[in-house]
Amino acid sequence: MTLCETEEPVEGATVIAFDRDWIQDDELGIATTDGNGRFRIDYLRGDFEPGTVVDVELVGGPDLYFRVETPGGQPLLSEDPSEGRTTSRENAGPCFCVDLCIDEEPDDPDPEVYPAFTHVGGYRLQTDIDSTPSGTGETVSGGRAFFGSLRLNGIVSKTLNGNPLEYKFQYRDQGASSWTDVTPSQIRKTKIGVLETVDTSVSPPSVDTKDYVVGGTPASDEVAASFNGNWIQVPQESGVLSGAGSFVPNHNQIQLDSRTLAPFTPAVDLTGIDAGDSADAPSGASLVQNEHVEIRMLVREHPPGSGPSAPTQAGILENIAINNRRYDYVRHPNWMEESVGDGLAVAMVNLEELESSGCEGIQNTLTVEFTAAHPNLGTVTIRIEGPGGPYSTSPSPSDSNVSGSADENLYGSVDFQHISGGKKVEALDDCSYIVNLSVGVLLTDGDTVPNDRHDQIAFCKG
């Protein structure tokens, strides 16, 4: 690690390595640069190979990108995740060397950095979320509301005024008068750092790390941070060469299960609507709008043998839009019906010509009926695959026979002749075709976004 202009080494910087994946990136490890600006991060194959349905490494080794921070968590270098897909970084081998440089030398680190809640996932509270009391509570870029497990993070220090630090989160409905503590049951297991120890009995000395976690059930090779009621006690280990080791924070604070703030049950029952109908059609059923919540972090010092100090606020999110609601409905109920339970959004497609019988052959007309609905609706696309195709369109309320709101509830029908590339239906080759409806959902957990919802139907021409 050097200064870009002078190539002087940078000492004491925190380097974090990541593996770029298709859906969810993996954190591979953390290291601190020495007096020569050098650092070493060791990781295992299991740290980047598939382990869950969202951990996808298709071939080879990890696709590396890096973040560099001061010991207090201030960013010095934040590489774009796409850097991991470049030729020099993709599928890195078992031994990989990298030269990193920063524009400015960091200030001498403060021996004690004040803790702060600054981000939800990768979104900064004040600039990346429209978080003013009168704002949307959604991301500034893309207009996404939040759902699922939210990674609350920022600056984590071990001490406050020289004493051990504790922190907790609170929430309330926007504008409410009183706050509610986030309890341990609302926290998904969160890696808040690592416990580093050095074995000096071997040459060269080996570094051993164990994940430090809060919430959930720790595995046998993990260390659990302690709760003091609803307060989280920051681990105090500070001797890397001692048997106790040293706690190195990664700036995660908690993974908050937002479903405990804006529930996903009961699912909205939309049974009875068909493709082409409004999602508000059934009596008493309607889309559930975003809930607006405030979240803040409190900190306090807890001297050994003494009672805790009065808590102080260390970061507040005045407005976050949360939507976890799910939907129940039935696709093409007139034939080969398929029930959808707990659907993230409504995505239904059908063909008017097949409503009486799914085995009818298409001759001279093709009318695609669809319903796409969610309070945070993204792009809606109809695509027909087959000989001469694909043919596609993105319907909008300005189209004939299309109704509703483009940002919430879009429904109606599209004639094939009005689909891009369409021609007379009778001129299509006698063959089979698939009509696919793709419905984007403008949600995020702060780090990832959900895949588009899909429905499809096949037909035969001739």
Image (cartoon, rainbow, N blue to C red):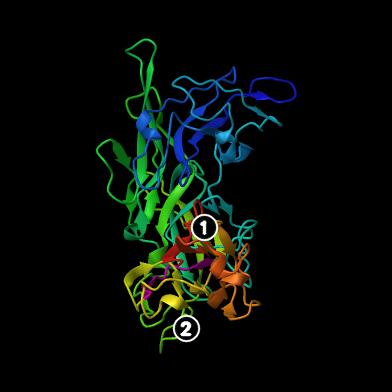
Q: Work out whether 109 lies above or below 226.
A: above
Asked if residue 275 can be seen in this view, the reply is no
The amino acid at mark 1 is: Thr
Asked if residue 298 can be seen in this view, the reply is yes
Residue 128 as seen in the image, left or right of residue 16 = right
Mark 1, residue position: 312
Extreme residue in the top direction: 203
Dots 1, 2 in contact, CB < 8 A: no
Image coordinates of residue 416 in percent, x first then y, are 57, 70
Q: Work out whether 265 lies above or below 192.
A: below
- What residue is drawn where x is 39% and y is 11%? 204
Dot 2: what SS?
loop
The amino acid at mark 2 is: Asp
The mark that comes first in sequence, 1 or 2, is 2
Q: Nearer the viewer, residue 418 or 203?
A: 418
Which quarter of the picture shows residue 182? bottom left
- What residue is drawn where x is 57% and y is 53%? 123
In the image, is residue 3 part of the stretch drawn in magenta?
no
Image coordinates of residue 139 in percent, x first then y, are 59, 60
Instruction: For label 2, count other residues whose C-alpha is less than 10 Å away and answer few (under 14), some (14-19) or many (20+).
Output: some
Mark 2, residue position: 280
Q: Which span of residues is magenta-colored?
A: 320-332
